[in-house]
Image: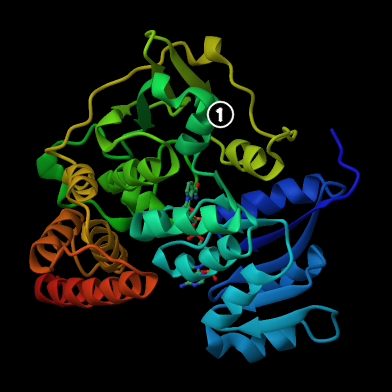
Amino acid sequence: MSFSTPKTITILGATGSVGLSTLDLVRRNPDQFKIVALTANSNVQLLAKLAVEFDAELAVIGDANKFSELKDALAGKPIKAAAGEGALVEAAQADASIVMAAIVGAAGLRPTLAGIRRGATIALANKECLVCAGELMIEEAQNSGATILPVDSEHNAIFQVFDFNADRSVEKIILTASGGPFWNKRSDCLKDVTPAEAVKHPNWDMGRKISVDSATMMNKGLEVIEAFHLFPVRADQIEVLVHPQSVVHSMVQYIDGSVLAQLGSPDMRTPIAYAISWPNRLNAPVERLSLADIGQLTFAKPDFDRFPCLQQAMDALKNGGSAPIVLNAANEVAVEAFLAERIGFKDISSVVHSALTKLDMKAPHSLSMVFEMDREARAVAKAIVAKISI
Ligand code: NDP
């Protein structure tokens, strides 16, 4: 299907895994999309190359120290260069009908909000910002008329099969989880796993932070919180089911016993295509699913003992207040320390646990409180990491 005028699109986090998959779809469908702005954090050369290839109007580098390098790389091109946190917000404010929110971590919150506040369609990959400020973000979207479309494969799957006209007939949402690279590892072997092993996901090719989150299963915990904010269900209506093949991307169970699922090959270009072309569908160059070749799909209950992060996130949702903010901030700090080989794999959940017990859990009433609590939680988590660093 082709549209009369191309949809304009800004990609926050263009140089990352989701950003590049989005650009791959744009590259293959040049008549349907026009890039307005692209952003990155520090990868100036790739950002400049993409901005030139896609004829962007604006290229923004988050790290202000890299501004002159970006300007040099774009010299003589009709592309505006900008740098710093404020410029990331400007990129989201630029006049594009779709903002792909694919910055990793809570760093994506301000720019994503800027897109929401001007009523754009937000293709939301950045789950951490919903975890930190879900209620406030949804409220802002209701005020501005922004549409939030989930990119995360599980939420995108639910979005495809959830009957929003009859939400009372939904009994539960079943989020599937691959179990990550260590699903079959014994608990006592987990303490020695290396960052290289943790980022090697069996099914998905993703950025380093989300890959570690998948290995600890914190990713699924963050997704439970994300689902709570995106869909009209209670926390106790969200269930996690381990499905190592990553073919069934999630399911919705209805009161008549029907279970509707979305299936597909594990390739982010399918959910991204759905988010950026909704309510239409876009031809995506993904491997077609052959269930006969796969033969067997298996399912299991999650193991909360071996993967405590999942339970920590579910508890944070139940406890509310600032618990999800602290959980997310402490996890970001711990994952970074693990990737830098300063703490072990099992320390990630210990850092999160200690941060959650050390901080006051009052509810944030404003975005400035969210940022303040996030800052405080990071400081506490860094101090915990410093104590246990190896
Ligand atoms: P990557 O690490 O691959 O990419 C992250 C992007 O964000 C890069 O463009 C990076 O720039 C930029 N970035 C990083 N830190 C900052 C910062 N402080 N300020 C501004 N920009 C920053 O991540 P993914 O693409 O894997 O994930 C992006 C988001 O999407 C995450 O929230 C993740 O949980 C979610 N997601 C990802 C999936 C996947 O398959 N990868 C699936 C579902 C959800 P630079 O390259 O310069 O560092």
Asked whether 248 or 206 is in front, the reply is: 248
Q: Quadrant of residue 303?
A: top left
Image coords of residue 241 (percent x, y): 30, 27
The reply to whether residue 306 is visible in this rendering is yes
Q: Is residue 14 visible?
A: no
Q: Is residue 63 left or right of residue 245?
A: right
- Residue furthest out toward the front: 143
Left or right of 323? Residue 71 is right
Quarter of the picture holding the C terminus = bottom left
Above or below residue 320? Residue 184 is above
Identify residue for label 1.
160
Q: Is residue 388 left or right of residue 171?
A: left
Q: How many marks?
A: 1
Residue at 28% in and 48% down? 218
Spot occupied by residue 389 in the image (x, y as percentages of width and height): 15, 72
Give percent across and percent down for residue 190.
17, 46
Please report the residue visible at 58 percent of the width from the left and 86 percent of the height from the top. Answer: 66
In depth, the one of 228 and 52 nearer the eye is: 228
Determine the secondary structure under disc 1. Answer: helix
Residue 167 position in % (x across, y down): 44, 26
Looking at the rendered structure, the kind of residue marked 1 is: Gln
In this rendering, would 143 be left or right of 313? Answer: right
